[in-house]
Each structure stands twice: as C-alpha cells, then as structure tokens.
Image (cartoon, rainbow, N blue to C red):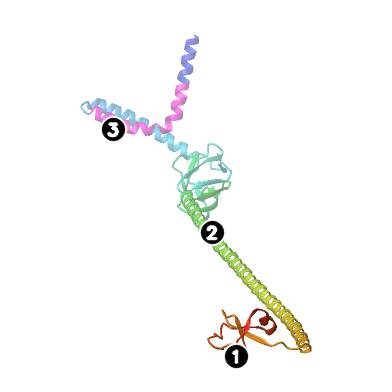
Amino acid sequence: MGKTLLNIFLVLICLGVLLSLLPYAWILFIPAIFLYRRKFREEPLRKKKYTAALGTLSLLSLCVFGYAQASAPDVEKISISPTSNYEMDVNSEYPINIQVQPEDARPKKLELVTDNGLLTLDYSRGESSCLLKSSGKTGESNVYLKTPDGKSSNAIHISVTDKKAEAEAKKKAEEEAKKKAETEAKLQAEAEAKQKAETEAKQKAEAEAKQKAEEEARLQAEAAAKQQAEEEARLQAEAQAKQQAEEEARLQAEAEAAAAQEAEAAAAQPVEQMVWLSATGEKYHRIPNCGNMNPDKARQIPLSQAEGSYQACKNCW
C-alpha cells in the first residue's frame, strides 16, 4: 500500500512538471516531427502516426503557450536592482534585475530612459533581467525602465567612463608632469649654476679687488715709507752735513785762531834765518840750487841748527 501511494505521488509530480513545461514543449516537438519523418521515411504508416501524434502535442503546447501569454495580468509596478550607483566602462555591460507586480505579469516591451542616449537596453536575456550596454559615449545618467502603458521603475545612477582613455590620459599627464618637472629641475639647476657662477665670479672679483687694493696699499705704504725714509735720510744727511760743516768751521776757526796766535807769537819773537841742505852734502847753502844741488831734493833748516852740524858754502855764503 505504501509503495502504491509513493508511485502515485511520483506520477503526480511528473504530471505537474510536464504540465508546467507544456507551454514550451512545442519548441522540442516541432524539430522532433521533422526528425521522425526523416527516420521513418521508408515506413509511411509509422511516419504518419508519429507525425500526427507529435503535431497534436505541438498544437496543444502552442495553444497552452498562447493562452498563458494572453491571460498574463498587466504590470502594476516595476522596479530594477541593484539600486546603488554604478560605474561601468564604456566597453562593458551592466546586468540589472527586473521585478514586477504581480509576479505573474509579463511585460511585453520595456523602454530604457537615459540621458543623451548614453546607454542601450538588451532585453534578450528574458523577462526578469536585462543588460545595459554603453553606446560608446562617456558621462553620467539616471536610468529607469518604462512599460508601454507608461509605468516607470525606480532610477539608478550610472557613470560611464573610458578606463583605457583615462589610463592613457593619466599616463600622458604623468609623462607631461614628469617632463615638466625635469624641465623645471633643469631650469632650476641652470639658474642655480648661473647664480653660483655669478656668486663665485663676484667673490673672485671682490677677492681680486681686495688683493689689488691691499697690494696698492702695500705699495703706497712702501712708497710712503721709502719717501719718509729718504726724507729722514735727507734730513739726517743735511743735519750731519750741517753738523760736519759746523764742526769743520769750528775746527777751521780754532786752527785759524791757533795760527793767528802762532803768528802773533812768531811776530813777537825774532825770525831766524833758514838755510838749504842738499840731499847728501855736508854744507848749508843760501839758495837751493847752488852748484850741483838738486832743488827738488833740497830742504830747509834753521841757521842755528845748521851751524852746529854743517859748514857754510863758500860759493853762496
């Protein structure tokens, strides 16, 4: 008994599955008709039998499918998810889910409302989902779905970017920034080098000017010292010459005074007669050139001195 109930339960489940799939069974039955007609081409009776059976089932499935579609209730409310803001690439797709109320309603055609034709709608995935595709433009848009009878879904905000173009633009900007930084660094280095060269040239010129000024001051000081030394030497020489002249004048005056005194003394005493002596003779003479005397070698002595040692010349005395 339990086994029988189980079999009945399984049969009912299979019937339920078949009934749920019945509206779509025609998709399989129609190709099967052509397959069986080709398979039983040599057996006209079986070909006719299978064709009739499969044709009947296909017609029944199509009728059920048409009834199911025609009897679906109208859409009262429609919404899409996810509802958060989304950023998509210009070459990518974004899937969204569609929820309708009542749940058994089947929207026949949905319209995508977007700004500036930024996105397009691919509704080929079925009734409960679709794809948002980029139209090749970049930008931002609020997107929502709209039914033929004017019912609108909630809106989602989508940003469409061209990541490749942004990466290229970023790379280009980085290269330009790098190039600009290198140019600025080069200009700054050149400016610093120029400033350094100018500073060094200025310092060198100042050092040379200082050295030149010191050299000129040294030469001027040496010239002044030399001039002062020469002046002092001149003054000292003049002083010494003056002193020497004064000394010589004093000595001369003293000599003249002594000579005057001697002259006075001599004048006061009687003058003694002087006689001449030859170089080798033994007689004294009145004149230096008496006889064979050499006047250049003759000398004078007082008569009183000559009389004591020499004899008088008989020729000149």
Q: CA distance from mark 1 to mark 2?
A: 122 Å
> In x, y percent, where is residue 227?
66, 76
Q: CA distance from mark 3 to mark 1?
A: 205 Å
Which badge, 3 or 1, comes first in the chain's sequence?
3
Residue 234's spot in the image, x, y percent?
A: 68, 78
Q: Nearer the viewer, residue 65 or 45?
A: 65
Q: Are marks 2 and 3 in contact (CB under 8 Å)?
A: no
Helix, strand or loop under label 3: helix
Q: Nearer the viewer, residue 257 or 294?
A: 294
Predominant SS along the magenta part: helix
Q: Secondary structure at mark 1?
A: loop
Q: Say few, some or many: other residues with alpha carbon within 10 Å of mark 1 (under 14 / 14 to 19 / 20 or more).
A: few
Residue type indicated by callout 1: Cys
In the rendered image, which residue does mark 1 sit on? Answer: 316
Label 3 sits on residue: 34
Chain-order first, disc 2 or disc 3: 3
Quadrant of the image for the C terminus?
A: bottom right
- As for residue 37 lying within the magenta part, the answer is yes
Q: Residues within 10 Å of mark 3 (few under 14, many from 20)?
A: few
Please give left or right for residue 37 compared with residue 124 in the image.
left
Q: Which residue is mark 2?
A: 189
Which element is circle 2 on?
helix
Q: Which residues are magenta?
A: 13-40
User: What residue is rendered at 45% in x and 26% in y?
Assistant: 17
**Left or right: 150 in relation to 67:** right
Question: Which percent across, then down, holds residue 208?
Answer: 59, 67
Give how far across and how far down residue 167 sits, in percent.
48, 50
- What's under tag 3, amino acid-wise? Phe
